[in-house]
């Protein structure tokens, strides 16, 4: 167990009133400028603010890229129930380190987040820490059992203001339950997120069904297990629902279905994980349990179709599906390993590598798929907003030319199931700012800096 960041007490101390960020390029565009923050909001943007504005604290942006704070629609912070693998505190630190100012934590905790009291405790704990806005996702069915709908209304009206519901980790198999959930969600205007997996087709499966699984002797998870549910739910959303979000799209066929659904005007949105964009089932040749994930890593043509779909807007957002697991569940035979991999601390670098460093897209695109669209889809006020005067100061600074090597022993997360161990990246989050407060600073790596700032 890691205990890199000994603090908590100081976190609720009053924030510094003013912060000046010098030498940054909003969205990586134009000449470097300065951003003055007061009482949690952007108060001025301009090139000579240093002369006219005196600030309690200053960050030298060193010519880096300034983005709206990142928003992750899909993480697992494991509290309550598996605090040995991640807690709201360690998960929040990992989020801040990855550049996130808001995350949505899934309901597959123990107990399941199927009641307001559990959602409220997650929300309150994270707010007291002040490192990241952690929004609890409510489950669609009680105990994730797929049988009885939870009280969406009570969770929405609770202090946690639950705005998304999902049985993620499990698929809502029964089409009639899914229909009723969509009808219920429509009345309350909340978002449903489906983990698309026909479980009859994935019994005993631990790898993508294809040439690699055949060669390695691993039981395969066919694409159709995902695609058949995406198709079914697109039709249900057309006839009974309003909004429906597809978690972790992983196949070329899912992309084709999303294209069809969007052409029909069906209000379907979708996410893709960094690992499904970067990695393929070729990684399974080592039989290393770190690469077991649901849905499984697929083939190269899937990764290419997913990349193009994100560029074209058929897939709306990047979401990490950050899924911490301890070594007792990962350093075992591949078939026995629990599915899931870490993502919060590497996602920005992975997306920069695939899209920005290759020239496929720019930082505006990164802002769209990792901040603006996730905040729009979840209807999250205050996040994913333009970098403009009067807007909340939820911001991320990224050094686009900072090469670093992923090292699982240096993570803020409590777990080490990092699929990028030893991989070199070219971009790095240097600072994260939540409502004008510094929640991450690479120079001092983490909360130590926040404690120092707060003590000033
Ligand atoms: O690989 C996964 N791990 N996929 C999921 O849907 C759930 C997650 C977890 O909770 O570990
Ligand atoms: Zn998940």
Image (cartoon, helix red, strand yellow):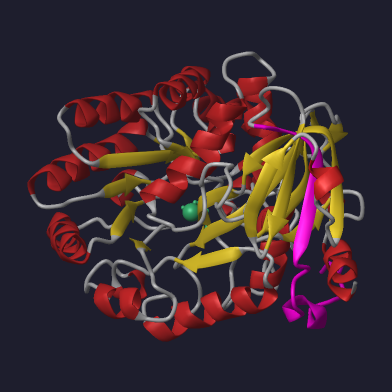
Is 44 in the magenta? no
Judge from the rendering whether residue 71 lies leftward or rightward of residue 142; answer left or right.
right
Judge from the rendering whether residue 338 lies leftward or rightward of residue 22; answer left or right.
left
Front residue of 222 and 61: 61
Judge from the rendering whether residue 380 lies leftward or rightward of residue 254; answer left or right.
right
Q: Residue furthest front?
A: 52
Q: Residue 307: x and y, percent? A: 49, 23
Residue range highlighted in magenta: 1-26
Q: In this orientation, does residue 213 appear?
A: yes
Is 5 in the magenta? yes
Q: Residue 227: x and y, percent? A: 29, 35
Judge from the rendering whether residue 297 lies leftward or rightward of residue 305; answer left or right.
right
* Residue visible at 80% across and 83% down in the picture: 9
Q: In this orientation, does residue 418 appear?
A: no
Front residue of 157 and 287: 157
Q: Measured along the vertical axis of the image, is residue 454 above or below residue 232?
A: below
Q: Residue 12: x and y, percent? A: 73, 80
* Residue visible at 79% across and 43% down in the picture: 49
Q: Measured along the vertical axis of the image, is residue 191 above or below residue 363?
A: below
Front residue of 451 and 149: 451
């Amino acid at each position: 167990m890691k205990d890199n960041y000994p603090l908590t007490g100081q976190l609720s101390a009053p924030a510094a009133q003013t912060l000046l960020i010098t030498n940054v390029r909003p969205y990586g565009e134009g000449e470097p400028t300065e951003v003055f923050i007061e009482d949690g909001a952007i108060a001025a943007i301009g090139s000579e603010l240093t002369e006219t504005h005196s600030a309690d604290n200053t960050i030298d942006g060193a010519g880096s890229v300034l983005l709206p704070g990142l928003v992750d629609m899909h993480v697992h912070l494991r509290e309550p129930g598996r605090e040995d693998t991640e807690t709201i505190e360690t998960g929040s630190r990992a989020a801040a380190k990855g550049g996130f100012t808001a995350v949505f934590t899934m309901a597959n905790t123990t107990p399941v987040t199927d009641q307001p009291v559990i959602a409220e405790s997650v929300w309150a704990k994270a707010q007291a820490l002040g490192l990241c806005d952690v929004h609890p996702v409510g489950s669609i069915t009680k105990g994730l059992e797929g049988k009885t709908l939870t009280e969406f209304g009570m969770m929405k009206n609770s202090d946690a203001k639950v705005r998304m519901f999902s049985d993620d980790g499990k698929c809502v198999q029964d089409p009639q339950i899914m229909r009723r959930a969509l009808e219920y969600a429509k009345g309350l205007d909340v978002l449903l997120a489906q983990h698309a997996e026909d479980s009859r087709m994935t019994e005993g499966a631990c790898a993508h069904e294809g040439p690699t699984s055949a060669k390695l002797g691993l039981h395969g998870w066919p694409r159709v297990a995902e695609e058949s549910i995406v198709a079914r739910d697109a039709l249900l959303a057309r006839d009974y629902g309003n909004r429906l979000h597809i978690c972790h799209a992983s196949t070329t066929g899912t992309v084709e279905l999303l294209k069809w659904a969007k052409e029909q005007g069906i209000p379907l949105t979708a996410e893709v994980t960094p690992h499904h964009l970067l990695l393929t089932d070729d990684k399974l040749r080592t039989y290393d349990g770190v690469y077991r994930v649901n849905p499984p890593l697929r083939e190269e043509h899937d990764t290419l179709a997913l990349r193009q779909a994100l560029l074209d807007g058929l897939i709306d957002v990047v979401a990490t599906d950050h899924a911490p697991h301890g070594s007792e569940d990962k350093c075992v035979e591949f078939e026995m390993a629990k599915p899931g991999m870490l993502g919060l601390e590497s996602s920005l670098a992975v997306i920069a590598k695939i899209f920005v460093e290759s020239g496929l897209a720019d930082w505006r695109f990164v802002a769209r798929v990792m901040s603006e669209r996730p905040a729009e889809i979840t209807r999250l006020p205050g996040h994913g907003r333009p970098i403009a005067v009067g807007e909340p100061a939820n911001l991320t600074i990224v050094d686009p030319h900072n090469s670093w090597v992923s090292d699982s022993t240096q993570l803020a997360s409590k777990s080490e199931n990092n699929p990028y161990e030893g991989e070199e990246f070219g971009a790095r989050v240097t600072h994260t700012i939540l409502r004008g407060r510094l929640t991450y600073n690479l120079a001092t790596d983490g909360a130590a800096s926040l404690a120092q700032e707060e003590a000033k």
